Image: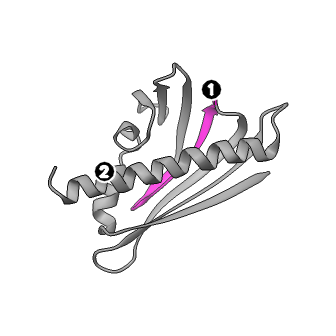
Amino acid sequence: MTAFELEQQYDAPAGKVWDLIGDFYAVERWMPGVAGVLRNDDQQTRTITLHDGGVLVERLTEEGPFFHHYRFDDAGPVPVRDFTAQLTVTAAGADHSEIHWAAQFEPAPGVAEEDAKSALVGFYESCLDKIAAELGAHAAGT
């Protein structure tokens, strides 16, 4: 099993960060490349359609105040299998917070472990960057 962890600090309270990212079905607000999300409450899944036509299905496995645990039911164009992740927001003082994102997976058959890991880390780093940009825009009142 391959794993990685990412952390990003923000100059925003944890509640404000969670207001942006906390809706499991609204990832288009902060995830680059998302064309749309189909919500399936009965199965607690979201089907994400990417701008390039790729589709993946993620299942919410646990949630609580300021965290989501989820897995890929169908990884679509992502070169992995048995993917699970945990996304958590924690307060770091009254006006600061941190996102911690941890994931575990197996590379898809024929894909080198480092290639799969590099693709995922690069994508999740772009998500963290977009969250920072969205929080900056909200803080500026735009």
For residue 31: magenta?
Answer: no
Q: Secondary structure at mark 2?
A: helix
Q: Give, as a three-letter code, the residue at label 2.
A: Glu
Badge 1: residue crowd in 10 Å (few <14, some 14–19, many ≥20): some
Q: Is residue 97 above or below residue 65?
A: below
Residue 102 in the image, given as x and y percentages of width and height = 60, 58
The disc, 1 or 2, on the residue closer to the chain's N-terminal end is: 1
Residue in the image at 78% along x and 47% along y:
114
Q: Is residue 67 positioned above or below 23 on the image?
A: below
The residue that label 1 is drawn on is 76
Q: Nearer the viewer, residue 114 or 62?
A: 114
Question: Compared with residue 110, is residue 4 higher up or lower down, i.e. above or below?
Answer: below
Query: Measured from the top left, where is residue 100 in percent x and y?
Result: 52, 63
Q: Is residue 135 left or right of residue 24?
A: left
Q: Nearer the viewer, mark 1 or mark 2?
A: 2
Q: Is residue 37 visible?
A: no
Give the image location of residue 87, x and y in percent.
Answer: 51, 56
State the residue position of label 2: 134
Residue shown at 14% from the left, 54% from the top: 141
Magenta stretch, residue numbers: 62-77
Quarter of the figure with residue 73: top right
Q: Circle 1 — which element?
A: loop
Q: Residue furthest bottom?
A: 93
**At 54% from the left edge and 36% from the top edge, which residue is drawn?**
58
Amino acid at dot 1 = Gly
Q: What's the magenta bit mostly, secondary-structure-wise?
A: strand
